[in-house]
Amino acid sequence: MELILKYFPDLTETQIEKFTRLEELYKDWNSKVNVISRQDIDTLYERHVLHSLGIAKVMQFKSGTSVLDVGTGGGFPGIPLAIMFPDTQFHLVDSIGKKIRVVQEIAGALDLKNVKAEQIRAEKLDDTYEFVVSRAVTRITPFVGWVRKNISRNSFHSLRNGILYLKGGDLVEELAELNMKTRTYDLSDYFTEEFFETKKVVYVPL
């Protein structure tokens, strides 16, 4: 939790309480349903919570924003972002039912009224959102194909509506394949931990 406060010192008491509870909730649920790798559960705050909040360094979602988290798995990046932005609505989707059940239970335990979790494939969704977030579920080009239809035309942020995608490694080839305008933010510019040296947020305006 100290790690989160190091980079986000202005959290409210409510936010601090919810972020603090993530560890016990994920350890408990992970013992029943493996949503985080065993070695990663001990680095939950660095590799999952803070990594998810890399998006919050790039974009401050305004009140009334709707965000879709595709392939949320155990709830990342959606749940940490929902704690950070309580006035933004988050729709967390995954094709694996047992993972969505964990997300629903954790969101319920934290009383996150701005989270809806659903077992559904992104391609089947008809709703629209200002932003789509995700954490490296596939290469960027097919991902854009899945969610392009779900981006709202109603844009009211400094960045145009689109995708905020957490990715790692060398993305030159992948972004060339996409052949669209993108902007890449290095998380090492915001976080000093070694884990973030190759981690990025890729913004794709749509």
Image: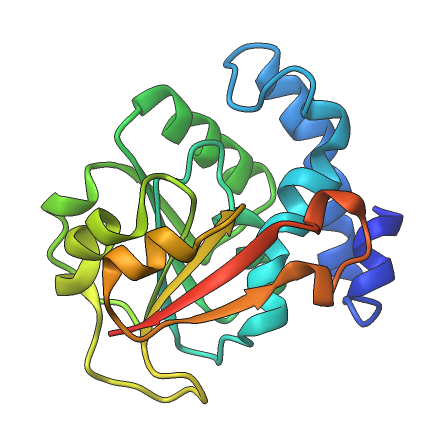
- What residue is drawn where x is 36% and y is 52%? 173
Where does the image place residue 83, in percent across and percent down from the top left?
Answer: 60, 57
| In this picture, residue 189 sits left or right of residue 203 | right
Specify the quadrant of the image occupied by residue 194.
top right
Where does the image place residue 64, in percent across and percent down from the top left?
Answer: 40, 77
Q: Say if residue 85 shows up in the picture.
A: no
- The residue lying toward the viewer, choosing from 178 and 104, is 178
Q: Residue furthest top?
A: 32
| In this picture, residue 140 sits left or right of residue 59 | left
**Quadrant holding the C terminus:** bottom left
- The residue lying toward the viewer, choosing from 106 and 147, is 147
| In this picture, residue 38 sits left or right of residue 89 | right
Specify the quadrant of the image occupied by residue 94.
top left
- What residue is drawn where x is 58% and y is 37%? 109
Where does the image place residue 129, in percent across and percent down from the top left?
Answer: 27, 67
Above/below status of 180 relative to 120: below
What's the image's color scheme? rainbow
Count of all numbered marks drawn on residues in the image: 0
- The residue lying toward the viewer, choosing from 186 and 153, is 186
- What residue is drawn where x is 55% and y is 63%? 55
| In this picture, residue 42 sits left or right of residue 187 | right
Q: Say if residue 81 shows up in the picture.
A: yes
Where does the image place residue 13, in percent across and percent down from the top left?
Answer: 80, 61
